[in-house]
Image (spheres, rainbow, N blue to C red):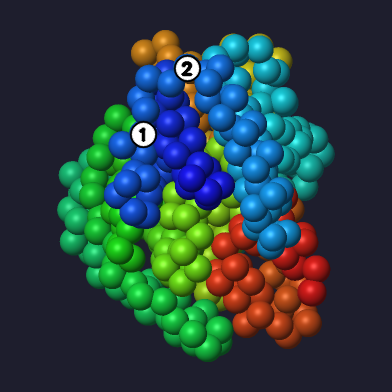
């Protein structure tokens, strides 16, 4: 087996391991040859053997991979995989070590003055809105057009299918057109689910199509739904280009998309910046306000996650904190607890507990500032080519190197 085949085999085995222990498979999607499908890999392998094989593959990388960006990308993916196995096996990592080990970013707590600054921006953005104070304004604005349950279900199953086709057109006209090249897009199918720790999830299916699931237990309004479509659709787009690159290069590791690695930071960062890529946030005041509010909420969840996982605060205290500092309802704060809690309702390790850091940090420390720099220098087409046509740029460890030209 060459090192890419070993990489995919081990990832599949590690995925089966995480599924056994947490109920969640670390392999988000796979669209390579059947022989290397994660389902076909060992489901019994012990942690010690996984770690051993990860180390062997790691050592082989340097001998077999010439491209330095690809090499660095794969090395860090294996390091993350190693951390995942150790985390679930020994459970002796601090939350900070876990976040840093998986994503190669630091577990940074936002200062209360940074949060105050974000609240000021939101206050300015909502100056003309009805309500006595900011909390009222946010509440009233989001109650307007809020949708849940069956209404949400019919909206998702009918209207969203049309919205997806429009979003696909937007990517084609505003991004692929200036890149001067295109990618096959066989579309996104929408589906409603409930009883999930997340609000929405894009499952890439291979063959240039996705299944997008929306959790209808959550209350959303039309603006949050639109923002969510842009976010999830960008995950689909990013995988379309990845599949295209896999078919062109034959580099097997591109056919497997793992969670909990440096890749996620950039994947969530580009998804969170899609509305900026498409120029939507300039034209639409609802989306603009939502961007500010989302960043405020994410700061409060990140701090909440640190209070809960690192400082041992109670769920009750953390819910109050997120309501107060993130301008959120109790219901929405309680839903976030499920995502960041160290354990699930069934008492297993919560696989998603460290994941919250990827979204805001991916956007504000990586994807968005580089996009602004490309806009200032008038090289946006080259920016998109690096993001979408070079999949090895898509990791927190390779991003800066991939954009050295800028
Ligand atoms: Zn996402």
Residue 13 shows up from this direction = yes
Give how far across and how far down residue 10 sits, in percent. 49, 35
For the point 48% across and 27% down, the residue is 351
Q: CA distance from mark 2 to mark 1?
A: 13 Å
Q: Which residue is mark 1?
A: 41
Give how far across and how far down residue 247 sits, in percent. 42, 68
User: In which quadrant is the C terminus drawn?
Assistant: bottom right
| Neighbourhood count class around disc 1 (C-alpha, 10 Å): few under 14, some 14–19, many 20 upward | some
Q: Earlier in the sequence, mark 2 or mark 1?
A: 1
Residue 251 appears left or right of 385: left
Helix, strand or loop for disc 2: loop
Residue 406 appears left or right of 146: right
Give how far across and how far down residue 182 sits, in percent. 44, 81
For the point 30% across and 49% down, the residue is 34
Helix, strand or loop for disc 1: loop
Quadrant of the rendered image containing residue 150: top left
Q: Is residue 134 above or below residue 301?
A: below
**Closer to the camera, 220 or 337?**
337
**Closer to the camera, 95 or 113?**
95
Quadrant of the rendered image containing residue 164: bottom left
Q: Which mark, by number, is residue 380?
A: none
| Neighbourhood count class around disc 2 (C-alpha, 10 Å): few under 14, some 14–19, many 20 upward | some
For the point 70% across and 18% down, the residue is 94
Q: Is residue 188 above or below residue 106?
A: below
Give how far across and how far down residue 107 sits, in percent. 73, 33
Residue 201 appears left or right of 156: right
Q: Is the CB–ligand 1 distance for label 1 below 8 Å? A: no
Q: Is residue 4 above or below residue 113?
A: below
Is the residue under label 1 in contact with that under label 2 (CB below 8 Å)?
A: no
Residue 366 shows up from this direction = no
Q: Which mark, by number, is residue 46?
A: 2
């Amino acid at each position: 087996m060459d090192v890419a085949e070993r990489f995919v085999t081990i990832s599949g085995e590690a995925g089966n391991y995480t599924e056994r222990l947490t109920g969640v498979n670390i392999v988000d999607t796979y669209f390579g040859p059947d022989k290397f499908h994660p389902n076909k890999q060992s489901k019994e392998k012990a942690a010690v053997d996984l770690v051993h094989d990860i180390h062997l593959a790691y050592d082989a990388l340097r001998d077999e991979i010439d491209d330095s960006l690809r090499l660095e990308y794969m090395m860090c993916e294996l390091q993350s995989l190693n951390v995942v196995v150790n985390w679930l096996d020994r459970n002796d990592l601090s939350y900070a070590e876990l976040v840093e080990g998986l994503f190669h970013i630091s577990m940074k707590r936002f200062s209360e003055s940074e949060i105050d600054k974000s609240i000021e921006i939101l206050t300015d953005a909502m100056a003309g809105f009805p309500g006595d104070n900011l909390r009222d304004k946010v509440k009233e604005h989001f109650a307007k057009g809020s949708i849940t349950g069956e209404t949400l279900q019919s909206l998702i199953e009918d209207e969203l299918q049309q919205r997806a086709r429009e979003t696909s057109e937007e990517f084609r006209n505003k991004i692929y057109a200036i890149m001067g090249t295109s990618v096959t897009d066989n579309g996104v199918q929408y589906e409603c689910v409930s009883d999930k720790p997340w609000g929405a999830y894009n499952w890439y299916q291979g063959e240039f199509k996705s299944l997008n699931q929306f959790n209808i237990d959550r209350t959303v309004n039309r603006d949050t739904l639109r923002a969510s479509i842009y976010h999830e659709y960008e995950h689909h787009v990013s995988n379309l280009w990845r599949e295209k690159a896999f078919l062109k290069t034959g580099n097997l590791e591109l056919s497997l998309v793992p969670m909990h690695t440096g890749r996620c930071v950039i994947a969530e960062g580009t998804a969170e910046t899609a509305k900026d890529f498409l120029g939507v946030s300039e034209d639409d005041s609802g989306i603009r306000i939502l961007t500010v509010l989302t960043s405020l909420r994410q700061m409060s969840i990140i701090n909440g996650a640190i209070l809960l996982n690192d400082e041992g605060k109670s769920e009750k205290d953390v819910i109050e904190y997120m309501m107060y500092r993130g301008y959120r309802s109790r219901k929405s704060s309680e839903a976030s607890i499920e995502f960041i809690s160290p354990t699930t309702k069934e008492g297993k390790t919560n696989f998603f507990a460290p994941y919250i850091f990827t979204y805001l940090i991916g956007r504000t420390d990586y994807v968005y500032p580089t996009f602004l720099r490309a806009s200032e220098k008038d090289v946006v087409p080259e920016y998109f080519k690096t993001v979408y046509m070079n999949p090895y740029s898509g990791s927190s460890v390779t991003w800066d190197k991939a954009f050295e030209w800028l």
